[in-house]
Amino acid sequence: MKAAHSLHLLLGVVLLAGCQRSAEPPSQADAPRKITIALLPKSKGNAYFVSCKKGADRAARELGVELLFDGPTDPDPAKQNEIIENWITLGVDAIAAACENKEGISTALRKARARGIRVITYDADALPEAREFFVNQATPEGIGNALMDEAARLCGGEGEFAIITASLTAANMIEWQRCIEARRATRHPNMRMVALRPCDDLKDRAQAEATALLSAYPNLKLIMAICSPAVPGAAEAVKQAGKAGRVRVIGLGLPSENRRYVKEGVTDTVILWKTEDLGYLTVHAAHALVTGRLKAGDKTFRAGALGEFEIQGDNIVLGEPFAFTKDNIDQYDF
Ligand code: RAM
């Protein structure tokens, strides 16, 4: 009886509490607000950025942040600016941008910063004052030297080669090309770059450019494709021209998009970093800026499961690039 009485009392308290809760919902201010991080790729359709997003999603889940991912379908600097303007209006906490046009995007990013939004860049930088940190996939020298040394090795140290780049305005492409040329001049002076062609970061356009290069330069020994869609694009052109093995293909690309050509012997070497890790590190860095765990002048940065990264000035560096050849390409699935 006593027990039944207590149970009624207890039920009463619970019901009452329940009634009070529904009558007075907690105010928005009481609920912890979720941090929103907005991630801008150069283009949404590029498998490179789809892979970055995978890592970014994982970081967002771990950190309990809301991740917005939006970008142009194909590379389009004006569309990138529009998306940033939308995020400014929405009042996101942080923007992480891979910039198609270094100068073009910087005004919008500066405006975001003036509104209190924390801004970083990844993959391709903006002007330094338009962001606080750049999450750099590898040093430009590391990338440039690796590409140029490999090209020279495949060509026996001499001969003509051409570069297919994404665009003439993206900071990463400009920097890498500068480093490729520096390495060529100092270490491989008998290698001659005969052409530099942009492909708008599109495979079909890269294939068309490579086809044109093959007929314009009959002595061409190698095509170096320095944006990811250009590597399979150049390979397809060389294959269709029946020049596999005579004109070598190397570049910066995803193992998944190049596996077939590497195995067929059309493409020799593909160089890249772990794109998922780049997305993961970027979201961790954006979150740390918002929460105050990352500040100007820091020398290292810890990003969850990936551990510690070196900060060089205002560049958080992901690490060394990898080289994929037919001997190891099957071990990678991105
Ligand atoms: C392209 C993008 C990106 C670059 C990679 C290698 O997909 O342009 O900026 O880092 O290639």
Image (spheres, rainbow, N blue to C red):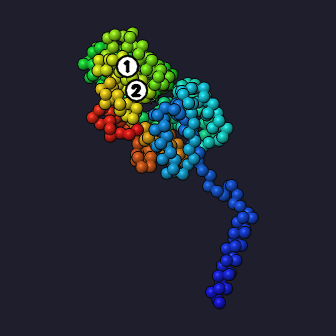
Local secondary structure at mark 1: helix
Residue drawn at point x = 54 percent, y = 27 percent:
75
Label 1 CB, ligand 1: below 8 Å?
Answer: no
Q: Is residue 288 visible?
A: no
Residue drawn at point x = 72 percent, y = 68 percent:
20
Query: Which residue has dot 1 on it?
Result: 240
Image vertical order of residue 106 relative to residue 222, above or below: below
Quick one: label 1, few (<14), some, or many (20+) residues within 10 Å?
Answer: few
- Residue 249 is left or right of residue 30, and the answer is left
Disc ID at residue 201 = none
Q: Position of residue 294 (x, y in %)?
A: 50, 44
Q: Is residue 54 visible?
A: yes
Assign the C terminus to one quadrant of the image. Answer: top left
- Residue 81 is left or right of residue 188, and the answer is right
Amino acid type for the residue under numbered disc 2: Pro
For residue 73, which quarter of the picture? Answer: top right
Q: Nearer the viewer, residue 197 or 114?
A: 197
Query: Which residue has dot 2 on it?
Result: 232
